[in-house]
Image (cartoon, rainbow, N blue to C red):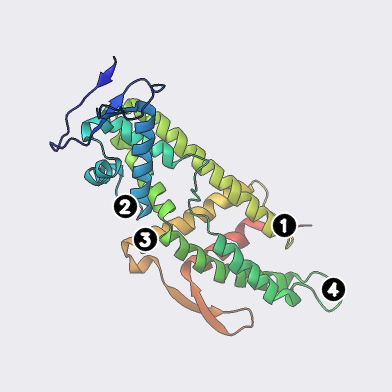
Amino acid sequence: MNETRPESDDGQDYGLRVHNDSSHDASSTASGRPRRIPRDELRTRVLDAAEELLADGAISVGLHHLNMEELIRRVGVPRSSAFAAFGGKDELLTALMLRLLDPAGPHSLGYSPGTNDVTAAAFRQHADLLTDAEGRPDPDGTVGVLHEAIRRGLARNVADTVQSAEWRTYMALSVSVSSLPPAQQPRVRAALQAAETRFLEQMAEDYRSALTSVGLRPVEGVTWIQIAAIGASLVEGIASKRLIGIPDADGVVLRPGIDGEPVEWELAALAFAAMIDGLTRPVA
């Protein structure tokens, strides 16, 4: 029989063993012998437990700082059994990274549904400024409403990004890749690139839909994807500085609002508005 019976690193016997044949019946025996766990089942249990741990708070440094003792306790197997199911700790971490970056998972990166709600509310509130007295599009009024939507939306977007466990986990995974053995890095890098591409494509479509509805298009030579990438970099950059606590990289200033009266603008919102103004033009 092809069965591994690794010893527990902490001297405890949890009554569970790994069986290398994933098709083997893993039910307990009537004689009371320890239950044998198919390798695929154990791998799934370990990864599920790791995700539960991370759900309590995003990783802030890297997966190598994951609480392995708590992970093993939750799974209920010796540490050596859990590692053996993956072929070692590095492969376990690699598998966990790929699980966290799975496109089927709930990973939204820097996307904030609440931001869409805030910006849409600004357009609804000031819909009368989008057209003139004859019902024709009013370019000046449209720019004013767009800037107000940006002022409100960017404040919400940065705040949501700072609080996003998914985003912090993604950033930690990005900087953790180099800690893996060279042979395992390409798989994780490819998953990171795929996740980032999906995110930018989603955001590019959001930008295209919102800005074309108010008569704007990218300047010649610039794509919606590029605008999305610049916008995401601005939001994530400010969010990371806020997490670190760099006061000079963030702040609020008074600038005229939609009615001409001074209102608070976050620096990120001012920068984002300038980016949109510089990279778009009215549709002819």
Q: Earlier in the sequence, mark 1 or mark 2?
A: 2
Q: Residue furthest left?
A: 11
**Where in the figure is residue 171, as x and y percent of width and height?**
39, 48
**Where in the figure is residue 72, as x and y percent of width and height?**
25, 41
- Secondary structure of the residue carrying tag 3 is helix
- Label 2, label 4: how far apart the Cα atoms are: 52 Å
In this rendered view, identify the residue nearer to me: 93 or 251: 93
Mark 1 highlights which residue?
212
Q: Which amino acid does label 3 sit on?
A: Lys
Q: What residue type is labelled 1?
A: Thr
Q: Earlier in the sequence, mark 2 or mark 3?
A: 2
Q: Nearer the viewer, mark 2 or mark 4?
A: 2
- Secondary structure of the residue carrying tag 4 is loop
Q: Is residue 182 above or below residue 121?
A: above
Q: What residue type is labelled 4?
A: Gly
Q: Which of marks 4 and 1 is nearer the N terminus?
A: 4
- Label 2, label 3: how far apart the Cα atoms are: 14 Å
Mark 4 highlights which residue?
135
Residue at figure coordinates x 30%, y 40% from the top left: 75
